[in-house]
Every structure is written in structure tokens, then in C-alpha cells.
Image: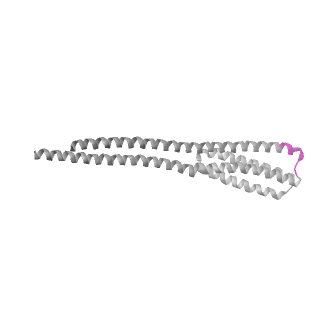
């Protein structure tokens, strides 16, 4: 009789230890899932904050800068003030700086960004030269209309490229936000599933152990 009680006691202890071990393993698994999901979310947020958001802000600033540059050229010619043209140089320098930052953050788009930077310089040189010659009265009036039309075409093409680049970066940024939301939703669902499995398994083991004690 004593031997049977001893055997039963050992069995019960093993069951209780097994229950504690199972719950510990389950808790570690749940914690591991949560940590992996958190790491993935943090990586996505870091990418948005460190790459796509700065690129998007710079793209919007460049598009606005080219519009202000064109308006400044027109105003300077209209009022005949040569000093006004100096403002456009600052616009150009700011755009060049932002282009370099974008190329560094998005090396896979460096070729496209370089093309926009080159087109910006080309438009600036042509527009500045035309505006300066008109203000100083040195322009060849027989060629002004053709040069102005060519500059207008350059401006239109450049503005279209800058706008398209900005819209694409907006899509990229929105896509990352949506991916982060989807990952969060999948993580929550997975945690519920794992938690439910652990709960059911723990309760089943506890009932089995309690029946053994009875």
C-alpha cells in the first residue's frame, strides 16, 4: 500500500511539474511571437521615418521650389529688376541639396533623381540667361519667342517629372503604412490564437492533474 502511494505521489508531482513547464514554454513562445512582431513593426517605422518620409518631404519641396523659381523669373522680367534674379540661385542650391539627399536615401532611384537634377540645372541656365538678357536689353528679339517656348517646354517637362516622383513617393509611404497596419492585425490575431491554444492546453492539463489527485 505504501509503495502504491509513493508511486501515485511521484506521478502527481510529475504532472504538476509538467503543467508548470508547459505553461512556461507557452509563455516564452507567446513572448517570442510578440517580440518578433514588435521588431518587424519597428523596422517598418524606422524605414518610414528615416527614408521614405524625408524623401517625400524633399520631393514636395522641390516641386514647390521650381514653381517659385519660374514665378520669380517672370516677375523679374516684368518689373525689370536684375537683383531679383539672385533669389532664383538660392532656389537652385536648395533643390540640388535635396536631390543629393534623395539619392543617398534611395540609391535605387539615383538615376531618376540625377536626371531631374540635370534638367533643373538646364532649365535654370536657360531661363536665367533669357531673363537677364531681357532685363539688360541685350536680347535678340527675333529669337526671344523661340527661346521662351523652349524654356516653357523644359519647365513643363521638369514639373511633370517632379510631380510624378512626388506621387510615387506618396504611394510608397502609404504602402508602408498599410503594411504596418496589416502586420499589426496579423500579430494580434496570432497572439489570440496562440493564447487560446495555451489556455485550452493549460486547462486540459490542469483538469487531468486534478482528476489524478482525486
Q: Residue at x 62, y 46 (%)?
A: 110
For the C terminus, which image quadrant?
top left
Look at the image and say whether residue 84 sits in the magenta stretch: no
Horizontal and vertical percent position of residue 123:
76, 47
Horizontal and vertical percent position of residue 42:
50, 50
The way the protein has been coloured in the rendering is: one colour
Horizontal and vertical percent position of residue 87:
77, 57
> In the depicted view, which residue is nearer to us: 20 or 55?
20
- Quadrant of residue 209 within the rendered picture: top left
> In the depicted view, which residue is nearer to us: 96 or 18?
18
> In the depicted view, which residue is nearer to us: 90 or 133?
90
Specify the farthest residue to the left: 1
The kind of secondary structure the magenta stretch mainly shows is helix
Q: Residue at x 53, y 42 (%)?
A: 179
Specify the farthest residue to the front: 214
For the N terminus, which image quadrant?
top left
Q: Residue at x 66, y 54 (%)?
A: 97
Is 96 placed above or below 175 here? below
Look at the image and say whether residue 142 sits in the magenta stretch: yes
Count of picture labels: 0
Q: Along the horizontal axis of the image, is 168 left or right of 35?
A: right
Q: Along the horizontal axis of the image, is 145 left or right of 22?
A: right
Q: Residue at x 21, y 46 (%)?
A: 12
> In the depicted view, which residue is nearer to us: 82 or 42?
42
Horizontal and vertical percent position of residue 98:
66, 52
* Residue range highlighted in magenta: 138-146
Amino acid at each position: 500500500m505504501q509503495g502504491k502511494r509513493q508511486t501515485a505521489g511521484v506521478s502527481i508531482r510529475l504532472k504538476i511539474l509538467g503543467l508548470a513547464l508547459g505553461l512556461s514554454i507557452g509563455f516564452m513562445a507567446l513572448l517570442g511571437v510578440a517580440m518578433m512582431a514588435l521588431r518587424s513593426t519597428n523596422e517598418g517605422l524606422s524605414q518610414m521615418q528615416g527614408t521614405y518620409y524625408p524623401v517625400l518631404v524633399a520631393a514636395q519641396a522641390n516641386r514647390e521650389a521650381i514653381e517659385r523659381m519660374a514665378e520669380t523669373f517672370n516677375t523679374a522680367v516684368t518689373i525689370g529688376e536684375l537683383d531679383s534674379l539672385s533669389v532664383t540661385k538660392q532656389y537652385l542650391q536648395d533643390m540640388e541639396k535635396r536631390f543629393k539627399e534623395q539619392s543617398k536615401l534611395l540609391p535605387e532611384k539615383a538615376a531618376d533623381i540625377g536626371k531631374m537634377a540635370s534638367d533643373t540645372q538646364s532649365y535654370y541656365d536657360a531661363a536665367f540667361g533669357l531673363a537677364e538678357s531681357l532685363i539688360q536689353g541685350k536680347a535678340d528679339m527675333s529669337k526671344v519667342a523661340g527661346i521662351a517656348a523652349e524654356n516653357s517646354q523644359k519647365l513643363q517637362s521638369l514639373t511633370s517629372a517632379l510631380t510624378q516622383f512626388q506621387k510615387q513617393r506618396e504611394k510608397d509611404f502609404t504602402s508602408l503604412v498599410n503594411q504596418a497596419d496589416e502586420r499589426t492585425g496579423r500579430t494580434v490575431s496570432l497572439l489570440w490564437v496562440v493564447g487560446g491554444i495555451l489556455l485550452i492546453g493549460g486547462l486540459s492539463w490542469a483538469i487531468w492533474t486534478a482528476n489524478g489527485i482525486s
